[in-house]
Image (cartoon, rainbow, N blue to C red):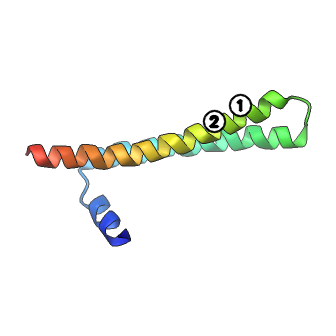
Amino acid sequence: MIKNILESFKNLDKLAKKIMKNGLKFCFFLGIISLIILITYNISFTVPLLYTIGFILFKLSLTFGVEFIICGFAADKIKKQLT
């Protein structure tokens, strides 16, 4: 199963691979920002809104990361079927 995923990642189109890498970088930085917000909340418990914002941003970064991966594979498969 993992070999199939790695093999399909190696056979991705250059543009799809570039979009996936840049999208995952964006998600990583979004996750880092959310972790900084959550650490700030952990240090000072004065503003509960920080927890909500940090948690939502972290969930958003994970969701975007999964969507970039799935959509990259799907777009590549559709492109290969059309040609």
Q: Is residue 2 above or below residue 13?
A: below
Q: Mark 1 falls on what kind of element?
A: helix
- Horizontal placement of 19 versus 34: left or right? left
Count of number-bearing discs: 2
Q: Nearer the viewer, residue 75 or 27?
A: 75
Which quarter of the picture shows residue 54? top right
Location of the N terminus (image quadrant): bottom left
Q: Is residue 21 left or right of residue 4?
A: right
Q: Mark 1 Cα within 10 Å, few/some/many (few <14, many 20+)?
A: few
- Residue 60 lies left or right of residue 78; in this view the side is right
Q: Which residue is mark 1?
A: 53
| Residue sitting at x 77%, y 35% | 51
Disc 1 residue type (three-letter):
Ile
Residue occupied by mark 2: 57
Residue 71 image position (x, y, % from top left): 34, 43
Label 2 neighbour load within 10 Å: few <14, some 14-19, many 20+: many
Provide residue 39's location: percent of width, then percent of height.
80, 44
Q: Amino acid at mark 2?
A: Leu
- Dot 2 falls on a residue whose secondary structure is helix
- Residue at (26%, 54%) from the top-left corner? 12
Image spot of residue 24 (x, y percent): 47, 46
Q: Is residue 33 above or below residue 12?
A: above
